Amino acid sequence: MEQQQIAAYLLKNGIRPLQKRVKIMSYLVSKRNHPTVDMIYNDLIHEISGLSKTTIYNVLNLFVESGVALALNIEGNEIRYDADTSVHGHFKCKVCSGVIDFRIKPEDLPNPGLQGFRIDEEHYYLKGVCAFCISKIEA
Ligand SMILES: [Zn+2]
Ligand SMILES: [Zn+2]
């Protein structure tokens, strides 16, 4: 997505498209790397003057509250952010700490035995070692 499209997308979701917000959303959409606040900070500090981790945190909170991003808590206190708000699963690699998306269909899920329940959030997490890291270990 271009910056203009991102700005329009934010506006449509009730978020004023300030420059920092557009840049951070653009980062999430283009990188698709499920970054932490620190990762975004390290990558954008040279691009956005006066950027602070607090600003990034506040922008991401706004995104999550407005429904344009998900906050993922895969392990410990580490929160990672995702601009893909559709239901999908996440695989975390123990070696490179990468978080990779996988598609999931309702028919793939085991019968949860929750008939009559209302599900508000769905999170599917797998952990292991990604193919890239396995190939490096075996090499
Ligand atoms: Zn890996
Ligand atoms: Zn994802």
Image (cartoon, helix red, strand yellow):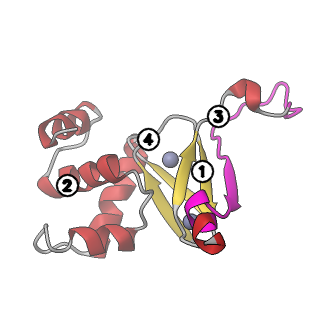
Reply yes or no: does residue 120 show up in magenta.
yes
The local crowd at label 1, few if under 14, some if 14 to 19, many if 20 or more residues have their Cα within 10 Å, is many
Measure the alpha-carbon separation of dots 4 and 3. Answer: 13 Å
Q: Position of residue 29 (x, y in %)?
A: 32, 46
**Comparing labels 1 and 4, the label whose residue is closer to the camera:** 1
Residue at horizontal 13 percent and vertical 67 percent from the top: 48
Secondary structure under the numbered disc 4 in the rendered image:
loop
Quarter containing the C terminus: bottom right
User: Whole-Å distance between the Cαs marked 1 and 4?
Assistant: 11 Å
Q: Position of residue 10 (x, y in %)?
A: 24, 39
Structural distance between the alpha carbons of marks 1 and 3: 10 Å
Above or below: residue 34 compared with residue 121: below
Between the C-alphas of marks 3 and 2, the distance is 29 Å
Q: Secondary structure at mark 3?
A: loop
- Precedes in sequence: disc 4 or disc 3: 4
**Rendered image: mark on residue 104:** 3
Horizontal arrangement in the rendering, residue 1 relative to residue 120 (left or right)? left
The span shown in magenta is 111-134
Q: Which mark is residue 27?
A: none
Residue under label 2, please give it: 23
Instruction: Give the residue pinned by disc 1.
Output: 90
The response on whether ligand 2 sits within 8 Å of label 1 is yes
